[in-house]
Amino acid sequence: MHVREGDTLITKEEHERRKLMQELRQKEALYRSKEPNFYWFSATSHLEHLRPENAARLIYLATFQVYDTRALMNGRKPIKSTQIADILKVSKPIAYAFLADVKEQGYITEGKDKELYLSAVFKKGRCKGNKKEYPYYKFYIETIRQLYRGTKVSEHKMLGYVFAMFPYINLNYNILCTDPYEKNIDSIIPITEYDFLINCGYNISNASRIAKRLANFSVTVYGKKYKLISFFGNGRISKS
């Protein structure tokens, strides 16, 4: 064997150790590639008891859910209550207020070592049971993350309103209506911003101001701004 100046020599044992670590990394990458790139959110829960900004943060936090469990992990480490400010990219006072809100409403529980667990309204894995009786919406993880990360902290409230609209979206015609499963366009009954706010338990005295903010609300994804909401006719809401 010819050894040149600057070459690094390793033992046979070290070579085997590196080979094993590489194989483990490859297996982990394969496992992660098979994980679903979405999670399920119960259609029966509108998060109406949460502050809108905290609803947006909770939906983002749910993207860290571990497959087939209710645990939250960032990489290989459990997410703890002390790390929420960093995970959500908010100040500590905002993080503490968020945790108090979601724990009081039962959406998150805290373990003895401060690790966090989601409630059953969020699922990552196979949905069991009757889907018509217990419907779930599919939220794509990367889309949720891009929307959240592209929104300023001061605009989390508007993003929360957008997420609250999801259960009312008719996917065939991209409009908010009373029956999102209706396929006959002539039978669709659109909802106004007032209808939406009442259904979500929000204060309608601020409806005009909120509607104006929603109409101007945009997120920045990959350096480009996108508007998410448009209104037409008598205050009816359409998704952009």
Image (cartoon, rainbow, N blue to C red):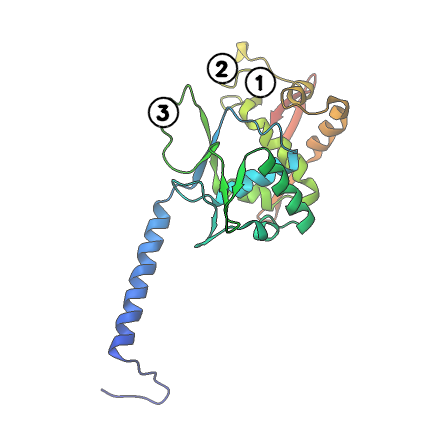
Asked where in the image residue 15 lies, by quadrant, the reply is: bottom left
Q: Label 2 near label 1: C-beta < 8 Å?
A: yes
> Which residue does the image show at 32% across and 51% down from the upper left?
30
Disc 2 element: loop
Looking at the image, is 208 positioned above or below residue 152? above
Q: What residue type is labelled 2?
A: Glu
Q: Which of marks 3 and 1 is nearer the N terminus?
A: 3
Assign a secondary structure to mark 3: loop
- Residue 117's label in the rendered image is none
Query: Residue at the location (63% across, 32% down)?
Result: 50
Of the pair 52 and 171, the residue shown nearer to us:
52
Residue under circle 1?
177
* Crowding near the residue tagged with mark 2, few <14, some 14–19, many ≥20 C-alpha atoms within 10 Å: some
In three-dimensional space, the C-alpha distance between marks 3 and 1, rounded to whole angstroms, equals 27 Å
Observer-nearest of 226 and 159: 159
> For the point 61% across and 24% down, which residue is it?
238
